[in-house]
Amino acid sequence: MNRNELFERLMRLERNVGQLTNDMTELKDLAVELVEENVALQVENDNLKRLMEKDEQSESNNEERSHSKHVKTPSPSKDNLAMLYREGFHICKGELFGKHRHGEDCLLCLNVLSD
């Protein structure tokens, strides 16, 4: 193999690696977007469940029911963590907790919110 062939192969490999990097970045951005949407929907769903439970409790005060539905309510601490994350702070466990995210998404933080 001569130098020109070697150089051409190296250039082709560099282009391929660059394309893989671009593809990986796009997939990561999409994953972050989907996780953020999922977390937002979970928080909204939890808030709606809480409202429904309050409504059911007020109805049960007016008339006794023979059965009661158990709705899992979100903890206020999870809502606080979601608020801190939206304000740009890390909420993941470890040394990053409480530090500013500088506008970057953190999959570990999003995982905390999705649990």
Image (tube, rainbow, N blue to C red):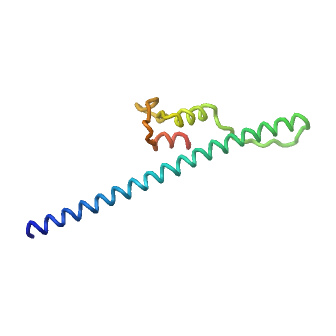
Tally the marks: 0
Q: Residue 95 or 98: which is nearer the viewer?
A: 98
Q: Is residue 69 above or below residue 31?
A: above
Where does the N terminus fall, quadrant-wise? bottom left
Q: Is 20 left or right of 77, judged from the image as shown?
A: left
Q: Residue 27 or 72: which is nearer the viewer?
A: 27
Q: Residue 50 or 104: which is nearer the viewer?
A: 104
Residue at the spot 81% in from the left edge and 39% down from the top edge: 55
Q: Residue 96 or 67: which is nearer the viewer?
A: 96
Residue at the spot 43% in from the left edge and 30% down from the top edge: 99
Q: Position of residue 94 (x, y in %)?
A: 42, 32
Q: Position of residue 26 (x, y in %)?
A: 42, 55
Q: Is 26 left or right of 73, judged from the image as shown?
A: left
Residue extending furthest toward the left: 2
Where does the C terminus fall, quadrant-wise? top right
Residue extending furthest toward the top: 98
Residue extending furthest toward the right: 63
Residue at the spot 65% in from the left edge and 37% down from the top edge: 74
Q: Is 100 left or right of 74, judged from the image as shown?
A: left
Q: Where is residue 98 in the image (x, y as percent from the top left)?
A: 46, 29
